[in-house]
Image (cartoon, rainbow, N blue to C red):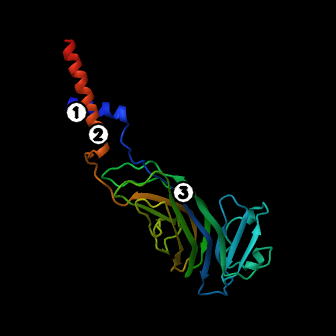
Amino acid sequence: MKHTAHAWLLGSLIFGLPCLNAAAKVDTSVTLTGLKITVSDPTPNDGLAAGFIANASGSSQYSVIASNGQTASYQDNGSSSSYGLPASGTNLSSALSQSIATFGGGYLGDISAAAHTSDEFVQSAIPFAGPRADVNASYGLFVKPHTVLTITGLLSMHASSTEGALLPNNSLEVHSGLGFSASPIFPYLTPGISELYYHSDALDLATGQASGSLSKDWSYTFTNNSDVGGTLELQWFIRSDIYLKTSVVPTTPVPEPDAWLMFGAGALLLGALARRRQRRG
């Protein structure tokens, strides 16, 4: 066994190591465009605001979704009265200085996750889970009693192999999507859970495939079935997870024809060196 290893190593050093498959690296990117909230209000003329949206964390631009499906926006003027939710029973037109423009809901804008490169894949019996690309945006919502808020957008994702080829007999499965965590101050929302996370359809990259893309509509609905209004703080995020769809248990490599030639050359050279030492002895 010792001489066999020496022969292999010596032949490899002389004639070159066998060509190994390079470990694949994959870039992924995810975007959600056209984020919008629409309101289904069973009492559209009661003068109550159905929603209150802060566009992004730290922003001074606000929007209010009126109970009749209209919306209005105003800039923060620095006064304390500009913060918080419209009081119950407050007429929207008197609470805002700007005129109300007819609009079907509140437009939240676009968010995207920066592309990232995964760690090198390791051939093993355990599927590989790559790093996640996250982007966060914060919104506050006031939900009227018996009001439905529907959140919609277009989710797009792309993945491409940037280095080497995928491992033999393996394909790459990329899961991406948008989700949010909600922290309601009242327990009447459906569903009444504190954190939600959604995957899009999986994007498969088969062995040898360089890239792939997927685009789909995304939507989710919040429902307040109670007689009490309340506030939601939504933390939005996008994640992109990478997995090896199938994995291969490492096995002892079978030498290729070129490897046998290297082994033979090394063995012959070792034999010649041994005979030379015997003659000197």
Q: Which mark, residue 4? A: 1
User: In the image, is 264 to the left or to the right of 105?
Assistant: left
Q: Nearer the viewer, residue 94 or 238?
A: 238
Q: In the rendering, at what x and y percent does residue 74 appear?
A: 76, 69
Earlier sequence position, callout 1 versus callout 3: 1
Q: Residue at x 38, y 48 (%)?
A: 122
Amino acid type assigned to the residue bearing label 1 in the image: Thr
Chain-order first, disc 2 or disc 1: 1
Under mark 2, the amino acid is Leu
- Which residue is found at the position 61% from the left and 69% from the top? 33
- For the residues labelled 1 and 3, the Cα–Cα distance comes to 51 Å
Do the residues bearing badges 1 and 3 touch, measured as CB atoms within 8 Å?
no
> In the orientation shown, which residue stands out farthest toward the top?
281
Residues at marks 3 and 2 touching, judged by CB atoms closer than 8 Å: no
Quarter holding the C terminus? top left
- 152 is higher (above) or lower (below) than 250: below
Q: How many marks?
A: 3
**Amino acid at dot 3:** Asp
User: Does the rendering let one see residue 63?
Assistant: yes
Residue 179 percent across, percent down from the top left = 51, 66
Q: Residue at x 73, y 76 (%)?
A: 72
List the residue tagged with mark 3: 134
Determine whether 10 is above or below 80 in the image. Answer: above
Q: Secondary structure at mark 2?
A: helix
Secondary structure category for the residue under label 3: loop
Q: Label 3 vs label 2: CA separation?
A: 50 Å
Q: Quadrant of the N terminus?
A: top left
Mark 2 burial class by Cα count in 10 Å: few <14, some 14-19, many 20+: some
Q: Quadrant of residue 106?
A: bottom right
Q: Is residue 244 above or below residue 50?
A: above
Is 18 left, or right, of 176 in this rendering?
A: left
Residue that carries the numbered disc 2 in the rendered image = 261
